[in-house]
Image (cartoon, rainbow, N blue to C red):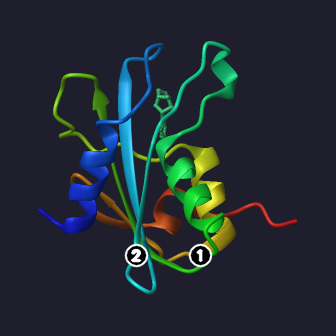
Amino acid sequence: MDELMQAARAAREYAHCPYSGFAVGAALRTVDGRIYTGCNVENASYSLGCCAERTAIFKAVSDGQREFSAIAICGAPVGESPEAPCIPCGACLQVMAEFCGDDFPIILTDGAHRLSEFLPKRFIL
Ligand code: THU
């Protein structure tokens, strides 16, 4: 398995998802070859939860990283192996679009996709 997807699967183990029971892992590669991982972190006040992708992106950006070459994502109910592709939510796609171009590779369990496939148009201020 690709190293990035392997890192996403490992990060998924840390998901805090007692409310949805759906665990997600993400791994973001920087252009200089580092990997930042993230998992979903839910909260008793539901709307305060954060998706795995945004956790990974915010970790990287807050560490001074701005240029990314790919992200791998996997998700499934807790206790199940992530087989079906977990397509990133719209909020996470818009956050990716802040730092990444249309061709940014999004690697799911069914293979590689591009940001523009899931977000053909982005919000621009
Ligand atoms: N979730 C993610 O981590 N990433 C996504 O792109 C979509 C959904 C999380 C949020 C919540 O903790 C759980 O999956 C169920 O929606």
Q: Is mark 2 within 8 Å of ligand 1?
A: no
**Whether residue 73 is situated above or below residue 13 in the rendered picture:** below
Q: Which residue corresponds to mark 2?
A: 34
Q: Residue furthest bottom?
A: 32
Judge from the rendering whether residue 98 lies leftward or rightward of residue 28; answer left or right. Answer: right
The quarter holding residue 45 reads top right
The secondary element bearing badge 1 is classed as loop
Residue 83 disc label: none
The quarter holding residue 47 reads top right
Residue 111 placement (x, y as % from top left) = 23, 62
Q: Which residue corresponds to mark 1?
A: 65
Residue at position x 48%, y 13% in the image: 19
Q: Tell me if label 2 and label 1 are in contact, CB under 8 Å.
A: yes
Task: Count every numbered label the image shows and give the total.
Answer: 2
The secondary element bearing badge 2 is classed as loop
**Whether residue 28 is situated above or below residue 56 in the rendered picture:** below
Residue at position x 58%, y 74% in the image: 100
Earlier in the chain: of badge 2 and badge 1, it is: 2
For the N terminus, which image quadrant?
A: bottom left
For the C terminus, which image quadrant?
A: bottom right
The disc labelled 1 sits on which kind of residue? Answer: Gln
Residue 112 placement (x, y as % from top left) = 29, 66
**Whether residue 98 is situated above or below residue 54 in the rendered picture:** below
Judge from the rendering whether residue 110 lies leftward or rightward of residue 108; answer left or right. Answer: left
The disc labelled 2 sits on which kind of residue? Answer: Arg
Judge from the rendering whether residue 2 lies leftward or rightward of residue 30; answer left or right. Answer: left
Instruction: Give the spatial CA distance, label 2 vs label 1.
Output: 9 Å
The 10 Å Cα crowd at callout 1, few under 14, some 14 to 19, many 20 or more, is some
The 10 Å Cα crowd at callout 2, few under 14, some 14 to 19, many 20 or more, is some
Residue at position x 50%, y 55% in the image: 56
Depth check, front residue: 40 or 91 = 40
Residue 18 placement (x, y as % from top left) = 43, 15
